[in-house]
Image (cartoon, helix red, strand yellow):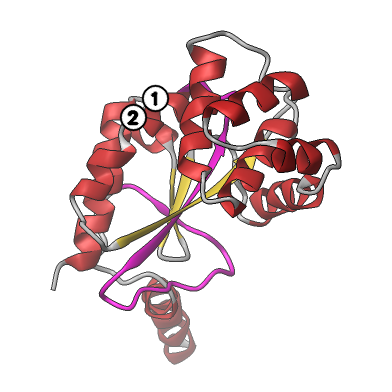
Amino acid sequence: MIKRSFIAIAIILLLPLAAFAAGTPANIKGSFTQVPGKEFKFDGKTVEVVEFLSFYCDHCYQFEKAIPAIKGNFPKKVKWKIVPLYWGQGSSKPGEAYLIAVDAGKGEEMKKALFNANFVEKKDIGNVEVLETIAVKVGLGFDFSRKLRGGEKAGEAGKALNMAQEYRIEETPTVVIAGNIMTNPHAAGHDMEDFKKNVITIMKSLFEK
């Protein structure tokens, strides 16, 4: 009976170690959670960061300003991918506009223009005509309008929501680093400066030998 109890206790104590062995390395610093069912992927040279955001989200707009500083800590070592979401009464159209712009090589310009239109110019970025005006400013023309009005990226925008459910995204922005290291502003008390520092801490620990 004592032997069985000892074995049971040993198994319980080893479970957390097994989880780390199968997923995220134990030396990762910072505040984060592991995405259930997702594998840790890092080749030691470059890291993929997937950012779930909404163009209606104030914290996403604030975090946008911090991204150059984050990337600047790891020159040519970060592949940053955006997954645009929309919550509640928000429209899928800003996300569709962004995805069309990405295909045209104007994703970064469109992202900045959408945030600016919503938070600075106070425009309705769910309005197709507003989005067409933004597209012209970033160098996109009739082909953009045709694709947006035709709903070419509507399916991909819907898949983004499914992906958010799959990753159990609870708020935006949320970043997933190296496949399964997930963090969001809640981990930093919703202080966006501390959130930026937390993301940098996590990523620095990845590259530490």
Q: Is residue 198 left or right of residue 108?
A: left
**In the picture, residue 76 is in which quadrant?**
bottom left
Residue 115 % position (x, y): 51, 24
Outermost residue, right direction? 150
Q: Are marks 2 and 1 in contact (CB under 8 Å)?
A: yes
Q: Is residue 16 above or below residue 164?
A: below
Q: Secondary structure at mark 2?
A: loop
Residue 89 in view (yes/no): no
Q: Is residue 144 left or right of residue 74?
A: right
* Residue at the image position 44 percent from the left and 79 percent from the top: 22
Badge 1 is on which residue?
A: 62
Q: Secondary structure at mark 1?
A: helix
Residue 109 % position (x, y): 47, 36
Residue 130 % position (x, y): 68, 19
Label 2 – label 1 distance at C-alpha:
6 Å
Q: Which residues are magenta?
A: 31-58
Is residue 51 magenta-colored? yes
Disc sitting over residue 65 in the figure: 2
Q: Nearer the viewer, residue 58 or 10?
A: 58
Q: Nearer the viewer, residue 10 or 141?
A: 141
Q: Is residue 136 left or right of residue 199?
A: right
